[in-house]
Amino acid sequence: MARNTSKSTRNETPVASGSDRKRAGSWWFGLFALPFAAVGVGMLLLGVLPTLYDWSRMQFWQPAQATLVSAQLNTSRSSKSTTYHVTARYRYQVAGREYEGDRVAIGSGGDNLGDFQEALGERLEHALQNGQPVPIWVSASNPAEAVIDRSLRPGLLAFQMVFVVVFGGFGVGMLVHLLRAPSRAGRKTSAQRAVAGGTPGKVERIPGGVQMYFPAGRWWGLKLALGLVGCVFLAVGLLVPWEQEAQADVAPWLFRLLFGGMGGAVLISSFYALANSLRVRLDHDGLRTERRLLGLMLQWHQVPAHDIARLNVVESYAVETNGRRQVYFRIEAALRSGKKITIAQDLQGRAEADRILASIGGWTGYPIR
């Protein structure tokens, strides 16, 4: 019986290469970061900047008196909160000409931060009932523009900045990182060595030294979580009821200072830690570092070789989760003047930090300790 020795044809599904998978992952990560960036940038362009612009120009407006046509404190209730919004119409005269306005405050929307809306609404309703005039502010260049209350509300501004810093900082930082990734990949050479393990950066050995790059977004999950914790503390400090502000009780102010100050500090620190990048060149000629924030130059150092005394590992910070304490380190260049410059950062664990220090010392010839 003849044996069939012909090979059967098989339909094989192509397997995506590692670069294709990495590119697809980058696109998905970019789509994930895009809404965060949109929220932050949108709040900055549509909320924070217009508020500051209107407030600054209103400081030059002239005082006048207006007669209220209508005034109402509108209330919108939900299962979790109550929002207040003041609306009013008023008439006033400038240079013998009568105008009508409806702008009550710098912001046109409602909110429930503090008692600003309630106090303003009650004041206007009381003035309307008693037929009393109300003071307003009128633009000298365009008398048709007027406002009743031109005060800047720091609590509302800080609340908006939370979205700008947390959401916008994360989204924009990740998008910048992704957009710069192809150019970084194109500069790779055979001498490049990725820093493995607990180091979110890269090292490239060069003649007589080393180049290092620590991109924005290092340990982004950890730092974003810290930012959210700071956001919660800041919100608690801002949302403490303001009914006591006119009284002698200082407890609400201390509470705001403690929670708001702590939350603001954590929020700013986590944003900086998430959005900054560090580029270092260390060789026989000396040291050069570039610190950038969202791609913009923030700080740089240039140090000749004879000014570098030694390189050493320093503990930066520690994070404890579920009873486990994780310590992060940095490597500093100690100068003969006593100044210290960070050349590597966010190194996870002392063993990894010591390994990187030994490699840098061996490649550059600078003393380590």
Image: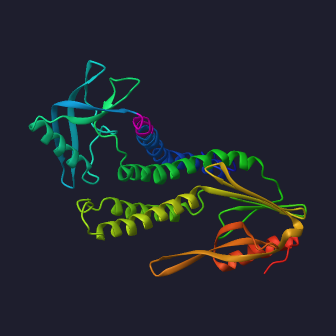
Among the 4 quarters of the image, the one containing residue 109: top left
Who's the residue at 52% across and 53% down the image? 170
Please report the bounds of the magenta region as a residue range: 53-60
Determine the residue located farthest toward the top in the rendered image.
Answer: 97
Say whether residue 126 is left or right of residue 295: left
Among the 4 quarters of the image, the one containing residue 272: bottom right
Say whether residue 24 is left or right of residue 208: left
Who's the residue at 30% across and 39% down the image? 105
Q: Position of residue 310 (x, y in %)?
A: 81, 75
Q: Position of residue 158 (x, y in %)?
A: 41, 53
Say whether residue 118 is left or right of residue 1: left
Among the 4 quarters of the image, the one containing residue 9: top right
Q: Is residue 215 visible?
A: no
In this figure, what is the number of numbered marks? 0
Q: Quadrant of the C terminus?
A: bottom right
Residue 357 is one of the magenta-drawn residues: no
Q: Position of residue 338 (x, y in %)?
A: 77, 74
Q: Is residue 317 visible?
A: yes
* Along the viewing direction, whichever of 164 and 102 lies nearer the viewer: 102
Q: Position of residue 106 (x, y in %)?
A: 34, 39
* Along the viewing direction, whichever of 70 and 45 lies nearer the viewer: 70
Who's the residue at 16% across and 38% down the image? 72
**Magenta segment, principal secondary structure?**
helix
Residue 56 is one of the magenta-drawn residues: yes
